[in-house]
Image: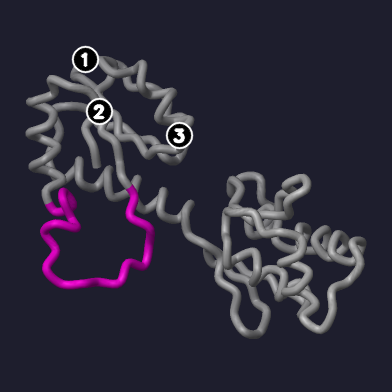
Amino acid sequence: MRLAGHGAAAYGQMARRALHPWLHLRETESKPRLLTVPVVDVVLLRWPLEHDRRDELQRAGQPLLLLVEDGTAPPVAASDLEDWIRLPAHDGDLQARVEGLRARAARGLAAPELDLDGVLRLDGRWVSLPPVEGRLTAALLDRFGAVVSRDSLARAGWPDGAPGRNALDVHMLRLRRRVAPLALAIRTVRSRGYLLERTSVERATT
C-alpha cells in the first residue's frame, strides 16, 4: 500500500497506523509462508488534491483507495479496483476498504487451474476439455499471460508428431470458444504464437 504524492504527513500517519499489519511485510515476517494469492499493492490517493494522478494509475491497472476530504463530493468509481472513504475515517474502516480492494485485485490476477482429467477451473466455474485441447491449454498455462510459440503448441498438442498448420488453427479456434465462459481469451500474436489471459468478467457468458 502506498500513499501517493508528497507532503501528506497527516494522511500518511493515519494510513501507516491503519495499515500497519501489511506495511513492510517481507521485512517483518520471521516465518516463511505459502502465498495463495498474489501480493497486491493498493495506492492511497488524496481526493481531490491528487485527482491528476487518478487516470494514470487507472490505466496501469493499479488498485486505488481515494481518501476524500470532508465536504468534498466523492467521484464515481471507475472500476472494481477503485473505492473511496471519507476523512476522517476510523482505522478499521480504512483497513476493510484496503483489504476489499486487495481481494478483488487478487481475483483478477489468479491463474486458471487444469487438472489431470482435463477440467479447467477458474473462479468457481469450469469447462471440460478434450485431450488435444487440454494439452494445448497446459502449454498456454505454463506461460499464462505470455506468448507461446506455434511450434511449442504443436509439440504440446501432438507429442507423437506435429500436425499441419490448419490443425493447430482449428483447435485453437475451438479452444477459444470453450474457455470464453470462464472469462478467458486466447489472443493471436502475429508471426509469434498465442497467449492466454483473463478478460473482464462482465463480457463472459455464464
In this rendering, would 28 be left or right of 122? left
Labels 3 & 1 near each other (Cβ < 8 A): no
Residue where numbered disc 3 is placed:
60
Look at discs 2 and 1 and give the one toward the viewer: 2
Asked if the stretch drawn in magenta spans residue 89, the answer is no
Is 134 situated above or below 63?
Answer: below
- Three-letter amino acid code at the position of disc 2: Ala
Neighbour class for label 3 at 10 Å: few (<14), some, many (≥20)? few
Is 73 situated above or below 157?
Answer: above
Identify the residue at horizontal 21%, vertical 32% (top origin): 3
Identify the residue at horizontal 24%, vertical 47% (top origin): 96
The quadrant of the picture occupied by the N terminus is top left
- Residue 91, image quadrant: top left
Q: Is residue 31 visible from the viewing direction of this image?
A: yes
Residue where numbered disc 1 is placed:
71
Instruction: State the colouring used for the structure image.
Output: one colour
The quadrant of the picture occupied by the C terminus is bottom right
Residue 4 is tagged as 2
The magenta region covers: 21-40
C-alpha span from label 2 to label 3:
14 Å
Is 13 situated above or below 155?
Answer: above
Image position, residue 85 (x, y; %)? 25, 32
In this rendering, would 38 be left or right of 90? right
Q: How many marks?
A: 3
Q: Earlier in the sequence, mark 3 or mark 1?
A: 3
Disc 2 secondary structure class = loop
Image position, residue 10 (x, y; %)? 8, 26
- Three-letter amino acid code at the position of disc 1: Gly
Labels 2 & 1 near each other (Cβ < 8 A): no
